[in-house]
Image: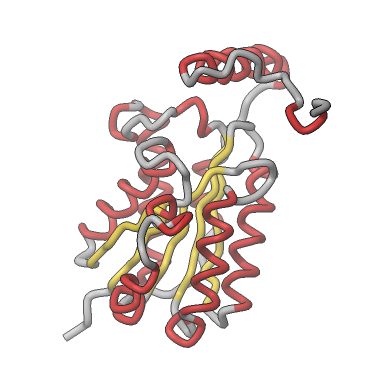
Amino acid sequence: MVTAKRLILINGSPRRNKTSYSFVRTIKMLSEEKNCKVEVIHTIDFFDGKNDLKMLKEMIEGCHIIGLIAPVYVDTLPYPTIWFLEELSKMYSIDLKGKDFFSIAQCGFPEFKFCQPLIDSCRFFAEVCKMNWLGGLGYGGGAILDGALFENLGKKGKNIIKALDLAVVDIIEGKKISCKPQELLTIKIPKFMYRPLAAYLNYSNRKTARSLGVSNIEQKAYLQES
């Protein structure tokens, strides 16, 4: 009898229910359809001592596969997630050794290349912890999704789900993620659309900032004289 694979999916976004979690949710669903057992961790729940990382010991010891899904913040992982991985490498280096590890990055830019630094950081973490690196995927345009459920996105959502399903099959079998999932996730946007897209994203960011009480997102706080 084949033992059911146990996965830990780490939501590396400081926001618990936005686009990164949409990926986590879908991967969890697809994995469970294949008789895997999946547990979800939010890095922000542990940052700054909110919860004790020691509570993860039994979960990490019992899992076969760990996946990190995160947004690109200033060309790499969000700081709370960098901190989380550093702490895991200190506390659980023995437990992590030999386990499979993969990552998925998503960013506001349409091009996949902007996700690559985050994926490279995850590969480095896997190497340091002597884990089996299964590869990473990148999705450009994650900001536009804004936490939407993929099954509600029509053709675009179907492509994302198909890509993740193909990746999950490889991951469960302990194989490197093949090229096909990335092909399905890669968005092809005509160059003439770049400026309107940038304008929309800038407008959206300013709107979000105002809703959080930030009146001037252009202000360079660290350059202000005290």
- Residue 75 placement (x, y as % from top left): 69, 45
- Residue 29 placement (x, y as % from top left): 25, 51
**Which color scheme does this rendered protein use?**
secondary structure
Report whether 46 appears left or right of 121.
left
Quarter of image, res 59: bottom left
**The C terminus: image quadrant:** top right
Quarter of image, res 34: bottom left
- Residue 210 placement (x, y as % from top left): 52, 14
In depth, the one of 167 and 20 nearer the eye is 20
Report whether 131 appears left or right of 159.
right
Above or below: residue 141 compared with residue 213: below
Q: Is residue 173 visible?
A: yes
Above or below: residue 55 compared with residue 221: below
Q: Residue at x 57, y 20 (%)?
A: 205
Q: Residue at x 32, y 47 (%)?
A: 26
- Residue 112 placement (x, y as % from top left): 64, 42
Q: Is residue 183 visible?
A: no
Above or below: residue 119 compared with residue 203: below
Q: Residue at x 19, y 66 (%)?
A: 35
Q: Residue furthest left?
A: 1
Above or below: residue 62 compared with residue 7: below
**The N terminus: image quadrant:** bottom left
Count of numbered badges drawn on the protein? 0
Quarter of image, res 198: top right
Q: Residue at x 43, y 55 (%)?
A: 43
In depth, the one of 7 and 129 nearer the eye is 129
Report whether 145 appears left or right of 186.
left
In depth, the one of 69 and 49 nearer the eye is 49
